[in-house]
Every structure is written in structure tokens, then in C-alpha cells.
Amino acid sequence: MGSSCDELNWDIKECPSPTYGLGYDDGTWETLGGSSTVPGSMDRWVEVNDIMLRLGLPIFIEGDLSKVEWGRFLRDVGGLVKAVVRDGYNPFEDMGNVVKRMGGGKKTNLASTFQVLYVGLTPTGPGSVLKTVAPALFGLLSSMEMLGSQRDEGGRKIHGVHYVEGGFGTIVDGIVNLLLSRGVLFRPGVKVSKIEPRKDGGRGAEVDGEAFDAVVCNVDVAGALENRLVRTRENTRRQNEEGIVMSPSVLQFHWILEGEEAKRKLRAHNVFLSDDEVGSWDAVRAGDKSVSRNLQNSGLRPPPFNFYVHNPGCGDDTACVGGGTVLMALIPIACGTKVTEEEVNKWEGWVKERVERRTGPIRVIYSKCTTPEGWEDKYGLKGGAVFGASHGLLQLGPTRQGCEVEGLRGAFWVGASKRPGNGVPLVMIGAEKTAREVMKFLDRS
Ligand SMILES: Cc1cc2nc3c(=O)[nH]c(=O)nc-3n(C[C@H](O)[C@H](O)[C@H](O)COP(=O)(O)OP(=O)(O)OC[C@H]3O[C@@H](n4cnc5c(N)ncnc54)[C@H](O)[C@@H]3O)c2cc1C
């Protein structure tokens, strides 16, 4: 948008090294990422994923061939062929199988695959790469995070984990202020209930009865179609078929802790991994019934599960002004799961117990939980699917929702469930594409 980080007031810094703390079931603790070297047993896996990232980013994600550096491209294709022949790497196979073939032991494999949670998939187990299991090509997420802050040959930073000082709200504030300065009008707090064809036959669409030359919908695609927020002239292809496969939801806990012990003992990003490579993803796969069954059967014993903990005070002092520690835990659970208050308390206890294996006893002085229903109510996300439409091969690249709302000319999608996909960087790339399509539409019509 022709602005700079300074102008936007964004102080973007690299995450203190090592980036990740990994807590295993047996109580052991390892660190990974940043300037620490990748364990030898992960070398081949990280190497091929690094190649996939360089090949995939400009071509398949950004769709911009001008960003391809062709000399490097040819070397990378050579490297990929070598990995296929030498290591049996297959980008379209179940990631769990491939990493077992190429990686080291169980712990290494767990550490090399948990990142697929970010795209709403599981690394292995029942299901298929067409819908819910991650194909090995998503290993590029781990190489992006585990390799230190390198730049590609065009000088772009494509590796490493970064943060903006002051928290993510700073990003939003920067964009809002920039747009205000460019004359954009906001109507905050207004909930849209319908987007439909214009009654006067003019170009564009109507939002709650008000006509616009073009309309961009940021409400998630599945929720917007299902709730008839977006009213197309005819049923869209996706509505007619079996619908969009959603990613999991998460239980989210925000904690404020007394003292700074936890802040010191945890890294900025922490993943607690269960020994049970397949069963630990059951909560994500199972849906409503088996999560409750699991909870009932397990009695006081927790089911195997993996979770993530963010410790923003590691690096960013503005996160814990006045002392103490703030933590945010994400526990992946199936989209649409109904969680009772009693279950929330059980999950919280289980998470706390696993965190304490690393930190020693912690005292939570403030706790707030968001459940799948909470995500749905607040953001219109179907079943609380915080990562939008899942990224199985049937909803990836050309098979994912495009910019235009089918059956409603002049209306466009933006956000996690359209191409190229979810997460802030991909949503931004997708937003740029939508903006171009809107401009083309306005020029044409
Ligand atoms: C806990 C959590 C942690 C995450 N961590 C990361 C991370 O570290 N890195 C990363 O890249 N991604 C992360 N993500 C994912 C990332 O936040 C999403 O993929 C991204 O924000 C999706 O963008 P979006 O534009 O589709 O939706 P949103 O950012 O949700 O924007 C949609 C907007 O539409 C508004 N809206 C909904 N319904 C209506 C209505 N009827 N009328 C008017 N407005 C409406 C909502 O209020 C919302 O502001 C995380 C997500 C969660 C939940």
C-alpha cells in the first residue's frame, strides 16, 4: 500500500533464539529453531522442504512468475528430484509416512510435523490427503520456522519466526490508521446480515439494502453461505455438493500468572507433544461424540493430546508490563465440538499440569477461555473452525474457492477460506488478488 513499517508503527523483530520449546510426554524438554542448528536426523527433511518453499511460494502461493529466480529454480528442481529418488520423498503422500522414511526417531518426527495444525490438517492417521491429512508438501511450514532468518536470492526474508512489538493489534492499528489517512470510511461494530443482488439492476451488490459498485465479503465462506448471509442467484456448486471441509477448532486459554518463572522457563513458542503420534490427534478428528466419550472414559486421566503455548513476554517486554507472565494456550479440537464448562475446567487442568512439568508450579490469577461456539458467535466461523476451510488436496490451489462469489456478480471473497489459504500472510496475498479482481471488474463494467 505504498507505506513503510515505520509509518505503520510496526517494529518487527526476530523471535529470540531458540524459537521453540518442545515438551514431550516423558517430561523431557528440547529447543529448536532460530540460530540453533537443526538436529542431524532432520537434515534431509528440512532440506527438501526448504526447496519446496522456494519452488512453491512464488509459483503456487503468490502465483507470480516474476518472483521466480530461474537459475535457483533449476537447481531446486534438481534437488527435489534427488530427494524423490534418494529418500523416497513424495509431496502428495501422507506426511507422517514420509517423515518416518526420511527423519529420525519418534520425537524428531513429532517436532517435524506439528506445524500442519496451522493449516487445519493432521500429520497422519485415519483420513486421506484429499481432505484431512496433510500431504508431505506442507513440510515447508516446518522449514520456514526452523531455519534461522535467511533471505532468498531476491533479498526477501522467507524463513524465521518474527513478532511485532506490542502484539498483533499493532498490525491492525497500523492498517486502520493508514486507510483512514487515505480516506477509507469504516463503520465499526456494524454486523452485516445479507449481501445480495442489487434490486435496481446496477453493477455490484447490495449490503443490507444499501447498493455498492462492488462488495468484498470477509465473513468466512462456509458460514456466509450456510447462514445465507451471502445470497447468490443460484445455489453455488459448493453448496450443492457435500460442502466445504472445515479445519479443526481450538480451545483457547488466556492466562495471567503470578511471577516470572514461567516466562523465563518457556520459549516464546512452545509445543507440548504427546507420545501417541496417532491418538493424540483424535480430539481433532473425532468430532463431538468421541471427544466427550474420550473425556468420560479417561475419568481423571487426560486423553493424549498436543497443544501450543505462546509466551509473548519472551522477547516483547510490552506483553507483561508490571510483572508476571502472560500465556496463551491453544488446544486443537474438532470443529463443531460442544464443550461444557466442566470439560473446559478439565482441559485447563490437563494443560496446566503439562506446562508445570517444565515450569514448576504456576499460579493462574486470571483465566479466560474461548470455545468453538465462542469463535463461531464472535467471528461467524462455521463450527468455530479458526483456520477456515481445511487445506486437503481437494481444497488447495485451483480447487480452493476463488475471488468471485459464484452466482452473485460484483461480490468477491477475501479471507482464510479462499485461495491461497489461511494464516495472516496467505490471507494478505489473497487480499491483494481480490483487490486486483475488483479493480478489473470496475474497469470492465
Ligand atoms: C488463536 C489463533 C491464533 C492464530 N495464530 C496465527 C499466527 O500466529 N500466524 C498466522 O499467520 N495466523 C494465525 N492464525 C490464523 C489467522 O488469524 C487467520 O487465518 C486469519 O485472521 C483469517 O483472516 P480472515 O480475514 O479470513 O478472517 P478474520 O481475521 O477473522 O476477519 C474476518 C472479520 O469479519 C468480521 N465479521 C464476521 N462476521 C461479520 C458480519 N456478519 N458482519 C460484519 N463483520 C463480520 C469478524 O469480526 C472479523 O473481524 C491464528 C488464529 C487463531 C484463532
Image (spheres, grey):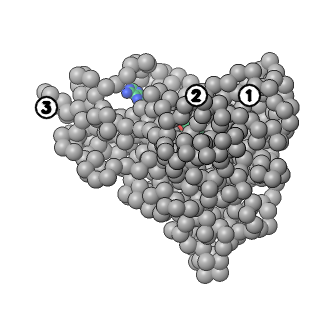
| Mark 1 or 3, closer to the camera | 1
Residue shown at the point (58%, 28%) measured from the top left: 341
Residue placed furthest toward the left:
200
Which numbered circle lies on residue 341? 2
Residue shown at the point (37%, 57%) measured from the top left: 399
Q: Secondary structure at mark 2?
A: helix
Snapshot quadrant of residue 354: top right
Q: Secondary structure at mark 1?
A: strand
Q: Quadrant of the C terminus?
A: top left
- First reached walking from the N terminus: tag 3 or tag 2: 3
The kind of residue on which mark 3 rests is Gly
Residue shown at the point (80%, 18%) measured from the top left: 322
Can I make out residue 251 in this image? yes
Snapshot quadrant of residue 377: top left
Residue placed furthest toward the bottom:
85
* Residue 298 image position (x, y, % from top left): 65, 45
Label 1 sits on residue: 326
Residue shown at the point (37%, 41%) measured from the top left: 221
Foreground pick, 397 / 214: 397
- First reached walking from the N terminus: tag 1 or tag 2: 1
Label 3 sits on residue: 201
User: For this view, does 411 lie left or right of residue 28?
Assistant: left
* Residue 135 image position (x, y, % from top left): 53, 63
